Image (cartoon, rainbow, N blue to C red):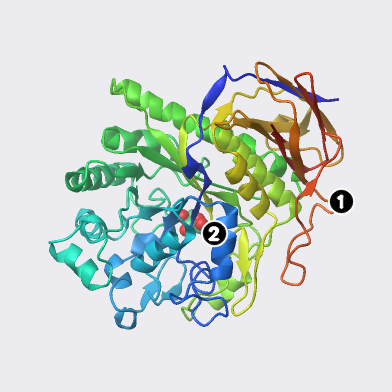
């Protein structure tokens, strides 16, 4: 019972856009406050940014960072978040029933990205819930216009002489969701998104714009929503968004481990819908995908902190601080594989979120920051998943799952770097059986296994905690061999694997 596939550079899916390794910072819980920003913390720099967290973010290899929401953005007034910090208003955040102090705002976000490094690109979400075209244009002028207008001069007066150069903008967030402040029908949102996009392109035709798709494939309006929104916006936007969160329910781990089956079908269904609208419009343009929220998220578990502690509108409460297991990390790895397998159409993807809130990095106020189990597959994929994705069609033993029927035990992709080296990313979905893997290399002259790293553990529920922050880390695997153009490896049960060939 082994699995196999063939790699041939003639059969490529497409180039990986570095923004596939994006993430997301929302004003939610402790993502911003005591997550990335904590003046007074022993590691804080002059701007109050936690340098211990910045170091981990760099190691994680994050590129685009979506901000400031999420549901939060649908009540966001950008003007509150600029200018002298002590004069900024405190506001009710309706999305998360918290008090927003605005001590971290637009300028601090840009400074944070610059400290991560040149690979970090802004991805600014606009409030199309309670606001509209005018406020979007004002924010664009404040952020991007060089000088000589009221708003660009105001930015300079606030201490930011240089424009922020925000190229990517999300036209709202999850506007299909009834929970969204200012929720709209597809027709209402499609018109507003089109008007906003048209006006923003009058300032700068080169902005990159993301229209809101469905907040999940299971939404009753899914696909019809995309078709209606794109009918209005097709020529005006570059991408449409997808959001998906997965969790284990009813102890059904086999289905959970197959979550990428859902993610891949979601991607393929949205691509089909985009292309259907394009065909109807007789357009040569292709709309790409921005999978700008994805992760494991235990939404259906009780969250007493939400129900009980939010009555008094707290500041930066502990919310959605899921502590991930080895199993969760293997699923995150598989979701990364799903994104890479569709690199021809997925231009941007954001792991939601970056710190504390369903995040790969956890912190304690005044205390340490550490890597969750899910940190590792993301960091490894971001580091080694750059180049051209090769088409991988697996022959694999399969097993039955309650949610997805028969599912192959092997989930895999491969990326060929510019120097010709190849990295195979593979997940063994079996909870109990090792999976022998054979990969035939056609017209790929590689001879060495540079590394086989695996994330697996005798305890699939093991996690990294404050008390034991390095309980789970990837380990090296011996015995993996490349001979006469054939790679042979054994994938441990319930494992994420990175096999680098040179
Ligand atoms: O990432 C958490 C929340 O999930 C976001 O605010 C929202 O967009 C989505 O529903």
Residue beneath the point at 33% across and 35% down:
230
Q: Secondary structure at mark 2?
A: loop
Left or right, residue 421 beside residue 195? right
The quarter of the rendered structure image containing the N terminus is top right
Q: How many marks on residues?
A: 2
| Quarter residue 300 falls in | bottom right
416 or 36: nearer the viewer: 416
Residue behind label 1 places its C-beta within 8 angstroms of ligand 1: no
Residue at horizontal 57 percent and vertical 66 percent from the top: 53
Where does residue 362 sit, x and y in percent of width and height?
Answer: 62, 66
Observer-nearest of 464 and 163: 163
- The residue positioned 30% from the left and 71% from the top of the image is 82
Left-right relation of 245 to 248:
left
The quadrant in which the C terminus is found is top right
Residue 404 at x, y = what percent? Answer: 68, 34
Label placed on residue 458: 1
Task: Tell which of 484 and 159 is nearer to you.
Answer: 484
Is the residue 271 above or below the residue 36 in the image? above
Please give the name of the residue rendered at 67% of the width and 16% of the height, measured from the top-left corner.
442
Q: State whether residue 175 is above or below residue 412.
A: below
In whole angstroms, how far apart are the C-alphas of marks 1 and 2? 28 Å
Instruction: State yes or no: discs 1 and 2 in contact (Cβ < 8 Å).
Output: no
Q: Measured from the top left, where is residue 201 in percent x and y?
A: 21, 43
The residue beneath circle 2 is 354
Q: Is residue 179 visible?
A: no
- Asked which quadrant contains residue 191, the reply is top left
């Amino acid at each position: 019972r082994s699995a196999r596939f063939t790699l041939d550079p003639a059969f490529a899916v497409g180039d990986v856009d570095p923004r596939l390794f994006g993430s997301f910072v929302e004003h939610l819980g402790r993502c911003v406050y005591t997550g990335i920003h904590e003046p007074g913390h022993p590691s804080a720099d002059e701007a109050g940014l936690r340098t211990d967290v910045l170091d981990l973010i760099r190691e994680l290899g994050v590129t685009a960072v979506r901000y400031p929401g999420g549901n939060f953005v649908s009540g966001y007034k950008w003007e509150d978040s600029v200018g002298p910090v002590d004069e900024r208003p405190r506001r009710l955040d309706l999305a998360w029933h918290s008090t927003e102090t605005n001590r971290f705002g637009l300028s601090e976000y840009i400074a944070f990205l610059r400290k991560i490094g040149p690979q970090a690109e802004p991805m600014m979400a606009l409030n199309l819930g309670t606001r509209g075209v005018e406020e979007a244009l004002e924010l664009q002028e404040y952020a991007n216009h060089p000088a000589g207008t009221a708003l660009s001069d105001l930015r300079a007066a606030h201490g930011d002489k240089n424009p922020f150069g925000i190229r990517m903008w999300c036209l709202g967030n999850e506007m299909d969701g009834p929970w969204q402040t200012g929720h709209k029908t597809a027709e209402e949102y499609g018109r507003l998104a089109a008007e906003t996009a048209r006006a923003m392109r009058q300032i700068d035709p080169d902005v990159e714009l993301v229209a809101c798709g469905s907040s999940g494939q299971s939404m009753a309006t899914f696909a019809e929503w995309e078709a209606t929104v794109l009918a209005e916006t097709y020529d005006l936007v570059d991408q449409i968004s997808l959001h998906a969160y997965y969790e284990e329910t009813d102890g059904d781990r086999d289905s959970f481990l197959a979550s990428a089956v859902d993610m891949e079908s979601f991607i393929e269904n949205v691509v089909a819908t985009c292309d259907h609208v394009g065909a109807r419009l007789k357009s040569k343009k292709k709309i790409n995908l921005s999978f700008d929220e994805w992760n494991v998220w235990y939404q259906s578990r009780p969250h007493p902190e939400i129900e009980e502690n939010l009555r008094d509108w707290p500041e930066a409460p502990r919310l959605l601080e899921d502590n991930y297991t080895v199993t969760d990390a293997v699923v995150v790895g598989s979701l990364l594989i799903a994104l890479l397998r569709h690199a021809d159409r997925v231009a941007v993807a954001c792991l939601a979120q970056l710190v504390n809130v369903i995040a790969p990095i956890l912190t304690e106020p005044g205390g340490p920051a550490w890597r969750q189990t899910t940190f590792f597959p993301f960091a490894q994929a971001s580091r080694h998943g750059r180049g051209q994705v090769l088409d991988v069609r697996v022959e694999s033993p399969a097993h039955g799952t309650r949610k997805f029927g028969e599912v192959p035990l092997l989930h895999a992709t491969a990326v060929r770097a510019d120097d010709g080296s190849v990295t195979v990313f593979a997940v063994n979905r079996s909870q109990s059986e090792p999976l022998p893997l054979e990969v035939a290399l056609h017209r790929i002259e590689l001879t060495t296994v540079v590394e086989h790293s695996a994330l697996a553990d005798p305890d699939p529920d093991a996690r990294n905690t404050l008390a034991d922050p390095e309980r789970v880390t990837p380990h090296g695997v011996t015995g993996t061999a490349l001979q006469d153009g054939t790679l042979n490896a054994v994938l441990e049960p319930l494992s994420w694997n990175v096999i680098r060939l040179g």
